[in-house]
Amino acid sequence: MSVRLLHPSIQNGIRAGDSEHAGGMLTCKCSDRPVKVNVSGGIAHNHACGCTKCWKPEGAAFSVVAVAPSENVSVAENGDKLAVVDPSALIQRHACSACGTHMFGPVEREHAFQGLSFIHPELLDGNWPEPGFAAFVSSVIEGGVDPSEMEGIRTKLKDLGLEPYDCLSPALMDYLATWAAKKSGVLRQ
Amino acid sequence: MSVRLLHPSIQNGIRAGDSEHAGGMLTCKCSDRPVKVNVSGGIAHNHACGCTKCWKPEGAAFSVVAVAPSENVSVAENGDKLAVVDPSALIQRHACSACGTHMFGPVEREHAFQGLSFIHPELLDGNWPEPGFAAFVSSVIEGGVDPSEMEGIRTKLKDLGLEPYDCLSPALMDYLATWAAKKSGVLRQ
């Protein structure tokens, strides 16, 4: 069955990435004065994401997104073009105001993900670790995917080795719940 | 591996329920003047739930909860003992103020689940359809389960035939997303 474009980097199979990579330069889509953001170390938790807020390449139903420690993420060139998409959001997505590409999204408020920045590894020069799962899959409906396509989409994600979840992966959901349980005092710090 | 009590009705295997059942009487745990609530038709989407708000029997990590159309749910006896647990919650859980048992929880505000009431089928006389999946599994950590137990809990749920999800099932998550997409205008009504 033909399945709509999920993401250009996964549609025709996932190439094993470079698990030893150590960051690189993120570059936006502008030909004139592109924004460049340096990631000075490894990225983690790379995954496909169907949420409506993540930046996606033209025509794609999913983004591909990972995290890096915010201390490793710094604007290298043309930072004057950056603007925060939604200042009220947990993830402060900094986008190029010319081409719209999301360059990095730090989590600054008190949260299990505080101190991490979300980045789109396809914008990196060089290689990067492949995605490991698919998150917020049902949310693509809110982005305009017809509900009748969902069975085909979940089947294709599984075939690609990207287990589909309608929230985050169990490991990350347990991590979030553990953080909440420590904060509430149910679990010891 | 020994796994803590998930729920008395599932811990030692799930008995096939009565898919033809047509409701029954919910009764709270009081020996004196028990609250009785009549469900005059079938229930649907019965599942185990790990969220911290659902009522659980003593010592259980999960509730077992289903829905019925609110129009089929009516207080039969001793309704004066009922009180809403949290008036600000989406689900208006009506609990017996003497024994604490949650008797029914209607969704009254505008929501995909508006018009449905959440009930705990173990309180019904007679038989009822067996649960079909497990929802909000990671949330049991917020209820005090140690994160180290999660692998064993998910394995046991799968062995029981209750696929574990950290939100609702894909069918229900798609249903929620479809409702949201219609409300926002992304999908046609």
Image (cartoon, coloured by chain):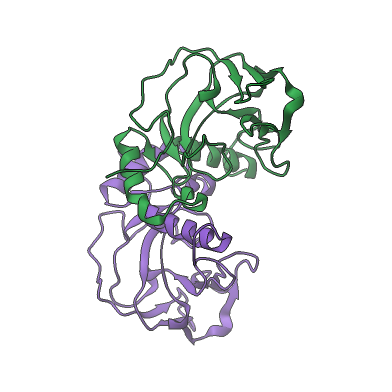
Chain colours: A green, B purple
In the foreground, A16 or B70: A16
Question: From the viewer's perspective, is A170 left or right of A35?
Answer: left
User: Is any part of residue B60 visible from this angle?
Assistant: no
**Residue B184: x, y in percent?**
58, 59
Identity of the residue drawn at 56% across and 39% down:
A54
Identity of the residue drawn at 70% across and 33% down:
A97
From this view, report whether residue A117 is shown above or below residue B124.
above
**Residue B59: x, y in percent?**
44, 55
In the foreground, B54 or B101: B54
Residue that lies at the very extreme toward the front in this rendered image = A32
Hey, which quadrant is residue A108 in on the image? top right
Q: Which image quadrant: the C terminus of chain A?
A: top right
From this view, report whether residue A99 is shown above or below residue A142.
above
Question: From the viewer's perspective, is B123 left or right of B35?
Answer: left
From this view, report whether residue B44 is shown above or below residue A47.
below
Q: Which image quadrant: the N terminus of chain A?
A: top left
Hey, which quadrant is residue B11 in on the image? bottom left
Question: From the viewer's perspective, is A126 left or right of A91?
Answer: left
Identity of the residue drawn at 43% across and 82% down:
B72
From this view, report whether residue B171 is shown above or below residue B97.
above
**Residue A132: x, y in percent?**
41, 30
Hey, which quadrant is residue A187 in on the image? top right
Residue that lies at the very extreme toward the left in this rendered image = B16
**Residue A55: x, y in percent?**
57, 36
